[in-house]
Image: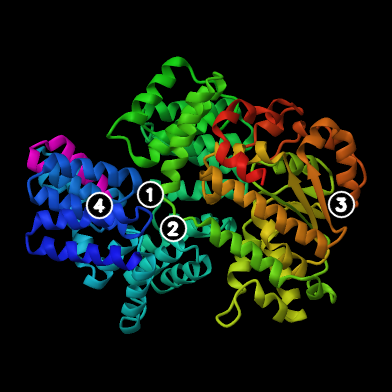
Amino acid sequence: MTENTSSLVNDAKQALMQSRFNDAISLCERAINLTPADPTYKDALYLKAVAQRLDRQIDKALTTLTTLLQAFPDYGRAYQEQGYCYKQLGDESQMASAFYRATRFNPALVPAWQELVQCYQRHQQQQALSLANEHIKHLTALPKPLLGAMDLMHEGQLHKAEKVCRDFLQTHKHQIDAMMLLAEIGLKLKVYHDAEFLLESCVALYPDNEAAAAAYQSLLGKLGKYPQSVALARQRLAKNTNSVAVKSALANALVGLGELDEAITLYRSLMDNQVGNGALWVQLGHALKAKGDTVDAIDAYEQAVKAEPDHGDAYWSLANTKTYQFSPAMIRQMAHYEGAKSTSLDARIHLCFALGKAYEDAKDFAKSFQYYQKGNDLKHRTQQFDIERTEKAMEAQKEACGSALYKHKSGYDVPDPIFIVGLPRAGSTLLEQILASHSHVDGTMELHDILSIASSSSNQSVPYPFNLASLSDETCTALGKQYIEQTKAYRGAAPFFIDKMPNNFIHIGLIKRILPNAKIIDARRDPKACCFSGFKQLFFDGQEFTYSLSDIGRYYNSYVKLMDHWHSVFAGEILTVQHEAVINDLEGQVRRILDYCQLPFEPGCLTFYNTRRVIKTPSSEQVRQPIYRSGMTQWEGFKPFLTPLLEILDT
C-alpha cells in the first residue's frame, strides 16, 4: 500500500509540473483516501493544495491547507502555501501572517522571507525589514546543499538532512555552517553526545563565532551541564559585555547550577531596560519560584502577561505554580489569545494547558479536559515520538541485563548516590524533599549524567545496552568515578546526595554496573492518578510519551514490567515507595526510607516543608507545604474522558 500511495504522489507531481491540475488533484485525493496513516498523506494534501491554488480554486486550497495544518501544525511549507493563497485573494494581513508563520517553522524558506520583505517595505516596518534582509543574506550565502539540508531538517526529514550534511563535510571538512547544522539535526534525533562534540569543536575551531557559542551554551543547559554552561557564559560575556542575550544565558545557567541569588540579581538588572520583554519576566519568575519566593514569582509572571498579553508561557507558568487562581477576566483573555490566528503554535499549546488548569480549578471538568486534550494533541503532532520504539528499548534492557551480568560486581563502590526513579508526577519530588531534609543528604535536581553516560558509552559494533556485558572492570570503575566527579558541582558537604531524574529507571542496569552500591528508590503512585497527572502537565523538555492517553498508558505498563525485571535481578536492592502510603503514614514510610538508605531517623524529615532549597520541578510549591490528600482523587472528575487510558491500564 505504501508503494501505491508513493506512486500516486509521484504521478501527481508530474501532473503538476505539466500544468495538469485536475489530474494532480484527482491523484492526490486517491492517495489521501487510500491510507491517511501513510507518510505520503502529508505530501498528498500539500500537492493537492498547490494544484488547487494554481487552478485558481483558492477557497478549496485553503480548506485543504486547514486539514493539512490540523494534522501537521508545524508544517512550514503549508503556511507558505497559505500565504500564496491569501496573496491571490489580496488579503495582505492574512498573507503576511501566513508567510511569517512559514518562516517561524521553517527558517530555510527563502521565498517566504522574500514575500515578507516586500510586505515590510510597503508598510515601512524598518526593524522587521532589516531582520528579514539579514536572514535572506545568511540563507543565500549558504552552500546550496546546506540550504537544502536545512529545509529537509525543518520539514522533519532528519535522516535525509543528516546524510546531506555528512556528505558535504566529507569534502568541506570543518565547515562551520555544516557542523552547526549537523549538530542541530543530532539534537532533534536525540544523539546528544554527537551534537555536543560537534558544537564543542565549533567553539574550539571558531572561538569568535557567537552563533556557535550560543548553540553550545544552549546544549550544555539542555544536558544539565551547568558548571560548563556558566563558565562558557562568563567567557562570552567578557567579549560581549552589554549583550542582553548573553547575560540572560548566564542567568539561566546560574539557575541551573543553583546560584539563584546571583541569577535573580542579574535578571533584575536586565529588567531595567527590558520591561517589555515577557520571556525575561518568565525566566525571572522561574528563578524566584525555584528559590521558594512564590509571591514574587507570581508577580514576575503577571508582569510578563502585561508586557506581552499573548505570551502563552507566562499564563502556563502561573498555572504551573499549582496554587494560582485565574480570574474570570484572565480566563477570557487566555481564551481570546488561544483562538487568535496571530498567536504562535507554542503559545497556543501553553494557553491550552493553562486553560485546562483554570477550568479544572473551577470544577468544569468537561471544558478543562477539552483544553488539556487540545494542548496535548497540538504538542503530540509536533513531535516524532514512537511508543513502539520506546517499548522495544525497555525490552532491550531486560534482554541485555540479566542476573548473570551482575554475579561479579564491578564499578566504583562508593555509597554516595541515592537515585529516585519512576514516572514523572509520581511523588518523587516529595521523596527527594524528605531525604534532602536529612543532615547527611544533599538534594540536587534531575541530573542528566546517567543519560549522558548511556548515550556516550555505546559503540558502532555493540549498541547500548548490549555493550554493558563487554565493559571491563576498569571501564566500569572509570564511568562510576566520572559520574561522581561530574555531579560534585551540585552537592554540598553531605556524604550522600540525591539524583532525581525519573527516566533513570530505564538505566538501572547501567547504574548497578558502574555504581554497585548506589541506592535506588522507585517512586510509585496510583497508575490512573499518575498517568493523568502527567497528561495534564506541559513539560519543559522530554517526556514525549505524556502527550497521548494511549502512549502514557502503554509507557506505564512497560515501566512496571521493566521494574519487575530490575527487582528480580537486584532482589532486595531497590526500594519501592507508594505515594499513597506516604500520605497515609508519613512517619512510618519516612523511617522505612531512612532504614533502606542506612540513615538514622531525624525529625526534620517529617517537617520537610520547612527545608529551604532549590526546587525546579512542577511540584515545587506542593512540597513546601504539609502533606495533603486532594491530589489522590483529582483524576476522578475526568473519568468519563479517560477511556483510552483506563482500557490500557486495566489490560
The residue under label 3 is: 597
Q: Are marks 2 and 1 in contact (CB under 8 Å)?
A: yes
Q: Kindly report the distance in space between the C-alpha atoms of the residues bearing marks 3 and 2.
A: 42 Å
Q: Which residue carries the number 2 mark?
A: 236
Indicate whether residue 349 is drawn in magenta. Answer: no
Q: Are marks 4 and 3 in contact (CB under 8 Å)?
A: no
State whether residue 227 is above or below residue 287. Answer: below
Q: Quadrant of residue 169?
A: bottom left
Q: Main secondary structure of the magenta part?
A: helix
Q: Which residue matches tag 1?
A: 243
Residue beneath the point at 68% across and 29% down: 631
Q: What stretch of residues is rendered in magenta? A: 87-103
Q: Tell me: 245 left or right of 610.
A: left
Give the image location of residue 369, x and y in percent.
50, 30
The earlier-in-sequence mark between 3 and 2 is 2
Which is nearer the N-term, disc 4 or disc 3? 4
Of 289 and 576, the residue lying toward us? 576
Q: CA distance from mark 1 to mark 3?
A: 47 Å
Q: Secondary structure at mark 3?
A: loop
For discs 4 and 3, the disc positioned in front in the rendered view: 4
